[in-house]
Amino acid sequence: MATAGTPLAPTLTSPRPVESELVISLGWLAGLRWIASAAVIVGTWVAGALLRLTIPSIPLAGIGFVIGLYNIGFTVWHRRIRRVGNAGDTHPYALARLQIAADWLAIAALAHLSGGVESPVIFYCVFHTILAALLLSERDTYIAATAAVVLLGGVAALEAWGILPHYHVPGLYAIEHYRQSLYLTSTFLFFTSTIFVSAYLTTRITRRLRAREAEMMRLSESLRTAYRQLQTVYASARDVTSTLELQEVLDRLTKSTTEAADAKGCTIRLLHETGTQLRLASSYGLREEYLHKGNLVVDQNPLVCQALSGEIVAVPDVAAEGRLQFGTEAIAEGIRSTLTAPLMGKTGPLGIIRIYCERVHCFSQEDREFIASVASHGSIAIENAMAYEAMQNLEESKRKFVLLVTHELRSPLAVVRSLLGTLSGGYAGRLTDLQQEVVDRARRRTDFLQTLIDDLLNLAAGKAGLRITGETAELDLHEVLATVSERFAVPASDRGIRLETNYVGPTSVPVTATAEELDRAVTNLISNAIKYTPQGGAVSVTLEARSGRAYLEVRDTGIGIPQESLDHLFEEFYRAPNAKSQVSQGTGLGLVITKDIITRYGGTIRVSSTEGVGTTFTVILPVSRDRTNRSLTTGRD
Amino acid sequence: MDTKTILIVDDDADLTLANRLVLESAGYAVEEAADGATALKKMRANKPDLVLMDVMMATPMDGYHTVQQMAHDNDLSGIPILMISAVTASEYAAQFPTTGPLPIRDFIAKPVAPEALLKKIQRCLR
């Protein structure tokens, strides 16, 4: 998204790649020129002093000096270009043209002083043609080539006509050619063709090189953009899916999208349940005044309709777009172009995501692809968060329902029981024996009804995974058993039943459960054992902890359970035939609830029984780790 | 010994009747209020020795809010309160922390056994 949103893209503020390449080349050329300048001076000295050639040494060395001198100017200019960049009069092309022109003049002067058309210096013109082709445009290269031909040709012609003096270098040629027309013509033709063919070949190669370079630049730029977008999409996807809170998901989406698109702002609007309006669900970067302009009405908004049908909709110029519901407000906010993508859920559109830009024609094809991918991963995150929210609401309404039913069923029954209680207790006057008997029977039936309702609600709550009975905690099963068995001591002895409790192993057996549920499970088992044991029998409860498990065994010498009933024992409302016939009261829910509780806390329940001999229930619960270690340590102390 | 006055605040007339019978047979004077506003009015007119307050009432001002009003009223904040509700003990505990600023002495769950009610009231009045 390099072009989206920023008024001046970075590529416009800094030199283009081709130009920065030119600036580097110019530096390199200036560097070479120091060597050329030195070579001219040294070469002149070598030719004059060592080879004893008769040459105008002082003017030649002077040219070498001049080359060095103007190179100082070029170097300073070049440094300035590098420092301030491409601004105003420091255009690198001007420097390139001037360097080539200065060098041509220097070469022409050197050639003239070292024999004119006979001078070997003229070969250097080929180098400069190649250099011009590398540094300048094609047109400038041909101008430079023509200048070389005119310059050198001019020198030769002027020398031949005697207008310029001819410096003969004895030893270079035995006879002087500079006035021989055939030599002059052929040299001129070959020189000209060499220069122009060099110019042609080099510019062709350079043209292809430059085209490739530009293509590579474009590719690497789009690769960089694609990589950046991919990173953004990935980062925002990760960020957005790391939470299940709907508002959090939406806020992260608008923020990350704005930042990634380098846009003015971003909004997410979700469809109202009726499907006729879009309400603002989250925004980033826009003012409150603009945001609170009102809901988008689907029917009045063709652009929204288009987006909701699954299209990406661009408004390149807000001022020129007549189909906007809040066009004036958008312009007042400084919005000049927008890009909208649909948020599509599994079953239909969820809403829209829109990015805003302060410039017209701000969004490119890449931006469209970007917003499409943001919208698609955003939709998944939004849908997940919505599903999670719905699930939580369902849990809450289930919980509320159970509590409501609890209250609605329990309340009237409680009133009936209270009223019967006042009658039976004689608070409303003394009753006759018959009246007392009738009231007590009514009380027993309402007591049973109360138990049934409690059992049903507990079972329903347990099955629904609702914990209406408080928080789980680490509880000492030892203590729970002691409390429950104490509660049953009187009822058991009233019925002539011996109730005994045995503890094997550590004095503390920590298990994780809610206090009420653990109490209920233990109570159910002991009360069953007492209920189905005839007078004179015994109920023996043993708690043993070994290898990370708690074993609670409740053994009675009761009526027992027929073999064929054992399989149905944990079914709702099931009561064994012998239980029904011998003990009138029983809901058939106690064991179901007990098993449900034990299973939910990671335990198991087993039963073995012989009819007429007795029954043994064994509950196995996992012992909480931390406390076991601690109690073992304490035990050693 | 003075006759202690107990104000029963409950929107359920049947339950109020049951509790009235029990309390009167034990020698208490009983006042009644079917909603929080009436209760506050009666309390201000004639300060009771104890308030037996139903938590959940289908009236604009339920037991919880009535108790809060009492806590903010210097004349009423000292009256001991026995809360009565159909919720279980742990649900109740979650709703009314015993360490709070409210002058709640105790809690009794419905259905209310007459003996248990009398025992709790005796303890609250002590």
Image (spheres, coloured by chain):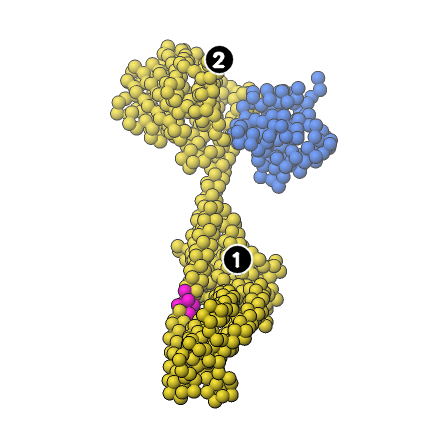
Q: Is residue B93 visible?
A: yes
For badge 2, the amino acid type reads: Asp
The local crowd at label 1, few if under 14, some if 14 to 19, many if 20 or more residues have their Cα within 10 Å, is many
In the depicted view, which residue is nearer to us: A339 or A160? A160
- Dividing the picture into quadrants, the one containing residue B66 is top right
Seen as rendered, the residue at the extreme front is A52
In the depicted view, which residue is nearer to us: A118 or A262? A118
Seen as rendered, the residue at the extreme left is A564
Q: Main secondary structure of the magenta part?
A: helix
Disc on the earlier residue, 1 or 2:
1
Do marks 1 and 2 share a subunit? yes
Q: Is residue B20 visible?
A: no
In the depicted view, which residue is nearer to us: B49 or B20? B49
Residue range of the region highlighted in magenta in the rendering: A210-216
Picture colour for chain A: yellow
Residue A370 rendering spot, x and y as whole percentages: 45, 60
Q: Chain of mark 2?
A: A
Q: Residue at x 27, y 22 (%)?
A: A562
- Give the CA separation, mark 1 to mark 2: 64 Å
Residue A32 rendering spot, x and y as whole percentages: 49, 66
Q: Residue at x 52, y 73 (%)?
A: A57
Picture colour for chain B: blue
Q: Residue at x 54, y 73 (%)?
A: A58
Q: Which mark is residue B15?
A: none
Q: Which mark is residue A637?
A: 2
Mark 1, secondary structure of its residue: helix
- Dividing the picture into quadrants, the one containing residue A520 is top left
For badge 1, the amino acid type reads: Thr
The local crowd at label 2, few if under 14, some if 14 to 19, many if 20 or more residues have their Cα within 10 Å, is few
Question: Relative to A269, is B68 above or below?
Answer: above
Give the labeled residue for mark 1.
A258
Question: Relative to A202, is A544 above or below?
Answer: above
